[in-house]
Amino acid sequence: MLGSRELRYLAVVVAGYGVDFGVSFSAFKLLGLPLPAAACVGFALAVAFNYLAHEFWTFAGTRRTGYGARFGKFIGVALFTLLVRVGVIFALDPFASSDMAHAALLVGAAGVSLGVNYVLTRFAVFGGRDMEPMA
């Protein structure tokens, strides 16, 4: 059973993915960016959205110190996740020959990076000793 924190995490991820996919596919189709570059643009905007939502909503209700260190970890996790996602896109893009295939590639690559991102964000960024219950 999912707890409230996990449900908030899921809600943020779904909303962040909406930002990510919408911006990525728009940058690919409307701006003519190559798919890996478009994925980077969408991902960057989604990272900003997700960090703020996680910091002030998903993991709210705790008094934490070290906002700067946590933000640095979050950016590190995001960059690693982006590397995983763009690697998948770069490897499979030559095989995508239609808009539907490119959209499916974006979705699939996001799915791969989602697992990596969840584990690292949950445990390495927001699961450390800097979290203590509010009194």
Image (cartoon, grey):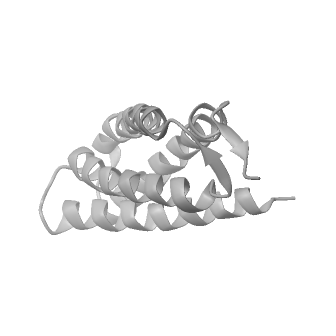
What residue is rendered at 24% in x and 67% in y? 26
What residue is rendered at 24% in x and 53% in y? 38
Q: Quadrant of residue 86?
A: top left
- Residue 72 appears at what percent x and percent y? 40, 33
Q: Nearer the viewer, residue 93 or 8?
A: 8
Q: Is residue 4 above or below residue 88?
A: below
What residue is rendered at 37% in x and 32% in y? 83
Q: On the rendered structure, is 130 left or right of 6?
A: left
- Residue 22 appears at what percent x and percent y? 34, 68
Q: Please state, as top left, top right, bottom left or bottom right, where the N terminus lies in the image.
A: bottom right
- Numbered circles on residues, count: 0
- Residue 126 appears at what percent x and percent y? 61, 40
What residue is rendered at 38% in x and 60% in y? 20
Q: On the rendered structure, is 19 left or right of 38?
A: right
Q: Nearer the viewer, residue 48 or 79?
A: 48
Q: Is residue 60 above or below residue 84?
A: below
Q: Is residue 6 above or below residue 82?
A: below
The residue furthest right is 1
The residue furthest front is 135
Q: Quadrant of residue 89?
A: top left
Q: Nearer the viewer, residue 42 or 66?
A: 66
Q: On the rendered structure, is 113 left or right of 93?
A: right
- Residue 105 appears at what percent x and percent y? 41, 52
